[in-house]
Structures are given as C-alpha cells and as structure tokens.
Image: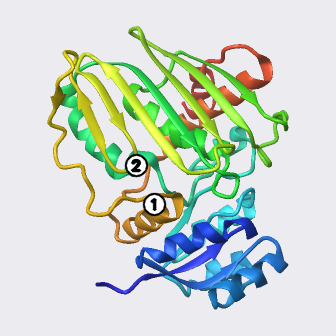
Amino acid sequence: MTEPARMLVWADRNQESMVERSLETGLVGIRSIGSPDDHAGRDLSDRFAAPQTTDLRAALAEGDFDIAWITARDVIDRPLREAIRACPRPVATSTLPIDPVMDLLSESDHGMPARFVPRMRQSRGCVSAMQLLEDFGRIECVHISMTAGQQQTSPWALLYDAMDVVHALLGIPDEVFAAHAGERSLQPDVITGITGHFSVALRFPGQAAASIVCSDGGGTWDRRILVLGSGGRLMIDDDRVSWTLPDGATADAGSTEPAEETHGVGELAAHHLKRVLESVEEAEAPETIGHVLAMCESARISCLTGQSEVPAQIIGSILS
C-alpha cells in the first residue's frame, strides 16, 4: 500500500468528524491543520496531533505537503485565490469562493483555482453512468437531490455540484426558476453564510427538463441522480448506477459495484483528493466552470426576484 498523501487541512471546528473519516480511509494523512478561528485551529491540532497552521496563505507558499484541502466555509476570497494560483502543490476545496459570481467570471479561471471535491460528476457511480449514455439514448428529464449537514458543506456548493452534472447531461438551459427556503433568507450580492434549501426547475431546448433540490439541512450526506429518457431510467449515487429499461427489465450497467462502498463526504473526499494528486481527475475547463457558475447565479437571482432567469444572458455578456 502506498503512503498516505500528506494534507494541509483548513477546516471549521464542526468539521472534525469529516476530517477524521477521511483519515480512516488510509489514503490521506495530516501534515498540518488550521482553521479561520485560531482557537478552533488549536483544538484541531491537538485532536489530530498535527502541527497547527495559523496562516493559510503562507502555508500554501511554503508547499510542505502533498495536497491542500480547504473545507472551511466562506474563506476563499481574492487574496487566497491568488495564493492558490501561486501554490507549488495541488489545492482542492469543498467550498466555493465568497465573491459575487459576476466578479468571479471576470477572472481567467472564473474564481476557481482550486479543484472542487468531491465532485459528483467524478464519482464512481456518475463516471459509470456517463459511459452508458451512448446506449441509453435521448435524455428527457433529470432530477438531482443533494443533501448534507451544515458541518459538511453549504447548499451553495451543492448547487454548483448539481448544476455541473446538469450541464454535462443537458447543456445550458433556456430558463431557470428557483426558490430558496430556510430561516435565513438570501441577500443580494452576498454569497457568504448561505444556508437552507434550494429548489430549482430548468427548461432546455427540445422539450427536456431538469430539477434540483439542495440542502444543508439533511443531517447526513446523500447525493442522487435520476435520469429519464428513451432508454428508460438511470438511478445514480456516489458508488453505483442501475439501469431500468422502459419495459421494466433491468439492463446490464456494467461493473459498477465498488470494492468498498463509501458512506460519507469524508471518505469520498479522501478518494477524490488522492485522485487529484495522482492526476486521475483532470482539471475542469474554465469555460465549463463559467457556464456552471452562470447557471448557479441565474438560480440565485431567480430566488431573489421570483422570476425565471436566462443563463445565456450572463454567459453572453461576461463569457463571450
């Protein structure tokens, strides 16, 4: 067995369990750990018997690790993005930048210099499903459900993950209509502190449709995709895909059963971090990142206005 990858971890206090689950895989280990809150950083350092990192940007510049994992919420501002771009080692994140999307889209990498993990489209179940699509035929309807606990990720990050899948399956929608629910309402031009639940409906050319539900109020990690079309039904989760034909028979979906099933975001992140480090997961094209962020921004604006929004307007004005 190869040595665990040495991680620089930047986490919130309530993410201790998630980090611990990543270590239990044996794929990663902690070189150093820190937190936006210095007291939390000391507690995490004591908990994992690892040196405390107090200055993330300085630690990224030193590069004394194999891969960095930024999982603390609401920390990736412009100076940190610059530090990530200059870092000599791979940097991954489970959160999104805090600046308004329209500002991010003006940057060459659209504000996403770190690799997003665990990306659903790179999961074992979704990779297997993508290999079936040529035989599956026309995709007519997609539904994606992604729920987690507040200690795991934000609904904004889950929305990005879900939109990334929708974009891969159906492209750019004609219209997006979305609603947000929860105790804390969305604020115009404010990305930090987003919590609660997103419900999104998307209409595509050619009578295709998609819907998304994302929430950090689900308590535990769960990502599922339903694809309906001429080939019947695909059911996809992080580990596997099943294919039911229109007549009710089960099609051969190939060898999708993993040797060891994953059960949470910590384990999933460890697998993805290792794959990023080994260059198994290729970096996303900036154009794709821009399109997905534009779709997310359309959903956010729709939540605020109560009207449907057109992602092509953002894409045309900013990304053309």
The residue at the point 53 percent across, 70 percent down is 21
Q: Which residue is mark 1?
A: 268
Please tell me in which quadrant of the rendered image residue 140 appears: top left
Q: Which residue is at the front of the view, 207 or 104?
A: 207
* Residue type beneath disc 1: Leu
Q: CA distance from mark 2 to mark 1?
A: 8 Å
* Residue type beneath disc 2: Asp
254 versus 145 height, above or below? below
The picture places residue 7, in percent across and down from the top left corner, at 53, 79
Question: Outermost residue, top direction?
Answer: 207
- Asked whether, in this view, residue 209 is left or right of residue 13, the answer is left
Asked whether residue 54 is in view, the answer is no
The residue at the point 27 percent across, 18 percent down is 138
The residue at the point 26 percent across, 44 percent down is 128
The picture places residue 38, in percent across and down from the top left corner, at 83, 78
283 versus 188 height, above or below? below
- Asked whether, in this view, residue 214 is left or right of residue 205, the answer is right
Q: Quadrant of the C terminus?
A: top right
- Asked whether, in this view, residue 34 is left or right of residue 270, the answer is right
Q: Which residue is at the front of the view, 288 or 202?
A: 202
Say if mark 2 contacts mark 1, CB within 8 Å: yes
Secondary structure at numbered mark 1 = helix
308 versus 155 height, above or below? above
Question: Crowding at label 1, few (<14), some or many (≥20) Cα neighbours within 10 Å?
Answer: many
Q: Which mark is residue 238?
A: 2
